[in-house]
Image (cartoon, rainbow, N blue to C red):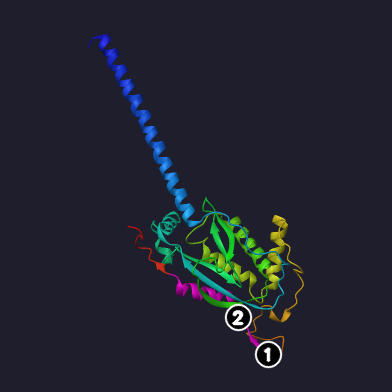
């Protein structure tokens, strides 16, 4: 080939190469933008991210009259639920040692009085604490599991402490070991009747680490008869016999019975 023709050929080849390179980057950028917009849309549909606290401030106390504690669940529905399931690892094979595992589109929380206390996720799928009113539009399937003496503000602070400790161990949401059921169990353990001293010690550590927390008379035990012992029956305030209730164990039984289990030998989304 004539040297001049060879040079012209190489110039054309370089132009084609540059054109393909530029077009590939344009396509990649468009694809990235489309994926980003899609992810943002799904995140918005799920409502990921921090939400305003809805619990009015009042003196946070852990010696109030007993109130009923419920656990409940509602579905994370539609495409948002599928996206959450895939992002949280549901679409991946799970090792044989794990057995069955909970459906992450079935969202569990702790309900006391007018408010729901729950684990949620920020935009990076790291766990956070949020609360909302029970009548916020979600249809909760609820189950009674025990009692608590915590006020609403004390419950909020207990929820913040539980999430803080979970984030220290592992900040990102995980379907197996860092999920809404784990949060519910840990919060119930903190707020249940008979766990005053354990809570006081854990909360004091949390206060020192974060500078947060204002619960009144943390180490003053106004109901020593309720503290956990090996005795199954204790005397109540009016002299009646009270059977001790293990709130966490009750919740574990309920969640095990009421949560859909997904087999580890097949993919959920095939």
The foreground one among 231 and 235 is 235
Question: Can you tell which quarter of the image residue 247 is in?
Answer: bottom right
Residue that carries the numbered disc 1 in the rendered image: 240
* Quarter of the image with the N terminus in it: top left
Q: Position of residue 78 (x, y in %)?
A: 40, 60
Which SS type dominates the magenta stretch?
helix
Would residue 94 be visible to someone looking at this image?
no
Q: Helix, strand or loop at disc 2?
A: loop
Badge 1 or badge 2: first in the primary sequence: 1
* Residue 96 in view here: yes
Who's the residue at 71% across and 58% down the image? 212
Residue 30 included in the magenta stretch of the image: no
Where does the magenta region start and end? 240-259
Please say whether residue 254 is one of the residues in the magenta stretch. yes
The front one of 182 and 134 is 134
The residue depicted at 60 percent of the width and 80 percent of the height is 245
When asked about the image quadrant of residue 12, the answer is top left
**Of residues 208 and 132, the one drawn nearer to the viewer in this rendering:** 132
- Relative height, residue 210 to residue 73 (above, below): above
Task: Report the quarter where the C terminus lies.
Answer: bottom left
At which x and y percent is residue 259? 45, 70
Residue at label 2?
Answer: 245
Q: Residues within 10 Å of mark 2 (few under 14, many from 20)?
A: some
């Amino acid at each position: 080939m004539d040297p001049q023709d060879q040079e012209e050929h190489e110039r054309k080849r370089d132009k084609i190469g540059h054109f393909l390179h530029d077009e590939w980057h344009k396509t990649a950028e468009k694809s990235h933008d489309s994926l980003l917009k899609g992810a943002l849309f799904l995140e918005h549909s799920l409502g990921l991210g921090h939400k305003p606290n809805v619990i009015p401030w009042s003196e946070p106390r852990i010696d109030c009259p007993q109130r009923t504690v419920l656990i409940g669940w509602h579905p994370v529905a539609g495409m948002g639920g599928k996206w959450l399931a895939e992002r949280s690892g549901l679409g991946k094979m799970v090792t044989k040692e794990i057995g069955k595992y909970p459906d992450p589109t079935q969202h569990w929380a702790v309900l006391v009085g007018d408010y729901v206390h729950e684990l949620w996720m920020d935009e990076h799928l790291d766990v956070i604490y949020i609360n909302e009113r029970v009548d916020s539009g979600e249809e909760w399937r609820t189950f009674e599991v025990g009692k608590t003496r915590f006020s609403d503000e004390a419950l909020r602070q207990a929820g913040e402490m539980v999430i803080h400790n979970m984030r220290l161990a592992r900040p990102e949401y995980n379907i197996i070991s860092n999920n809404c059921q784990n949060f519910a169990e840990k919060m119930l353990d903190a707020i249940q009747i008979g766990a005053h001293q354990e809570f006081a010690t854990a909360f004091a550590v949390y206060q020192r680490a974060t500078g947060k927390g204002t619960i009144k008379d943390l180490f003053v035990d106004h109901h020593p008869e309720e503290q956990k012992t090996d005795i199954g029956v204790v005397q109540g305030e009016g002299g009646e016999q009270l059977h001790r209730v293990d709130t966490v164990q009750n919740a574990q039984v309920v969640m095990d019975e009421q949560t859909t289990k997904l087999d580890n030998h097949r993919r959920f989304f095939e």
